[in-house]
Image (cartoon, rainbow, N blue to C red):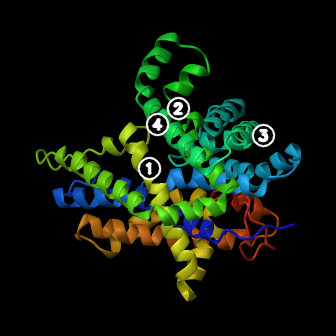
Amino acid sequence: MKKNSIKEVHVLRALAFLAVVLQHSIGHYLSEPDTTLSDGVMFTLFLLISKFSVPVFIFITGLVLFYNYDGPLRYGSFLQKRLKDIGIPYLFWSIVYAAPALLQSTGVFTGIQQFAGLAFTGKASYHLWYIVMIIPFYVTFPLWRWVIRKVRSRILTSGRAIAAMVLLAAVYVYGMTLIWPIYQVAEQWNVPVLTPMLTEYADRNSLYFFYYFVLGAVSGLALTQWREWLRRNGPLVYAVFFSLSAYLTYRVVVGFENTPASQNHYEDLLLLRPVTAVFLIASILVTYKFGMRAAESVKGVTRRALWMVSQYSYGAYLIHALMLTWATLLSDLLLPQMNVTLRMILAFILCSAMSVLATFALSRIPFLGQWMTGLGKAKKKPQPVPSLSADSMKG
């Protein structure tokens, strides 16, 4: 029996995709020589309001998986669906992004080796790290489900559940303080696989993002209580979010250098930092509250646009790095000599629209469309509770 639709998930997925594009648009213009101090401040504010993207995608993955799969799990079919909907499109676009490097390979075997390394690590393009990070959550889903169900059976009241999640959040935030010491120790040990996972590829280590997945899982298992808790505790959530926003803005802006040429730095906004982790948890709560309100109140063209972005978000995510190249060229052509922030905003709008429309068009290609986007031709509207492009943006 199908469950009721989680309407706010469509809003969250659409917003998270747009936030990713906004961050990458900012990333393109950060190094522009004519970037001023005021541009740096604007970029800081835009980065803060869009930083929720990755945590929200991970949160959605946990929420949708635990909401949908509360009965018997056929693990083989589960993995087969994820391979078809996520894995194959990922490999297709990895080939596209890696093509320039692969064409310079000295031989076929060398090229295959090179591509395997790029695909396994997500280094074919700067944005593909996320897919490499999220896939282990799907592969280990039965283990996560078993652990969370065991813990849930011992927590008999909502008060205890909240206390457990707060305690786990504290453990997670403390864990962020250990990442650098772990990095140093792992580098000294030089253990194959383990050392790269804790050093060079630490930013795509799933364990460093586990709390957002668990928070989504708990929300999916107790959706009604989760919504009600957010409604009751809105003032507290907003207070934490805006306080941390102000603090992080100050930390970033105070570090700006006026000479030479506004060399602005944004290290304080990196994902794997203790204060940032608290901010991101608060961001998930604020974004979900907004998603609930938008799902209830947004109508007409805006609603259809959000639902369309949500439906095509996975393919659009995969293709957006390619579209951003064209979007920035168009923006600079249309707004020559204009303020860097304005050019960034136009590039963001163009890239978002081009990515979604390109995914829509590609998904209509018989057979190949699903390989490229994870969406079959027959899928014309979002399902009640989608699965991977589907699960988080898919995830």
Q: Is residue 62 left or right of residue 336?
A: right
Hey, what amino acid is under mark 3? Pro
Mark 1 against mark 4, which lies toward the viewer? 4
Q: Residue 207 in the image: state x and y as whole percent.
A: 58, 34
In the foreground, 51 or 83? 51
* Residue indicated by mark 2: 201
Tag on residue 170?
4
Report the residue marked by disc 1.
280
Give residue 142's mark: 3
Q: Amino acid at mark 1?
A: Leu
Q: Is residue 98 visible?
A: no
Measured along the vertical axis of the image, is residue 179 above or below residue 148?
A: above
Q: Position of residue 116 (x, y in %)?
A: 68, 35
Say which element carries label 3. helix
Label 1 CA crowd tier, 10 Å (few <14, some 14–19, many 20+): many
State the separation of the CA atoms marked 1 and 4. Answer: 13 Å
Kindly indicate whether the residue at mark 4 contacts the one at mark 1 (C-beta within 8 angstroms). no
Q: Position of residue 125 (x, y in %)?
A: 54, 46
Give above or below for 261 relative to 198.
below
Cβ–Cβ below 8 Å for labels 4 and 2? no
State whether residue 246 appears in this view: yes
Q: Nearer the viewer, mark 4 or mark 2?
A: 4
Dot 2 surroundings within 10 Å: few (below 14), some, or many (20 or more)? some
Q: Which residue appears at 76% of the width and 70% of the height?
A: 365
Checking the image for residue 145, the label placed there is none
Indicate whether 296 appears above or below 363.
below
Q: How much space separates mark 1 and mark 3, taking CA atoms?
A: 26 Å
Of residues 38 and 6, the one nearer the viewer is 6
**Label 2 vs 3, first from the N-terminus:** 3
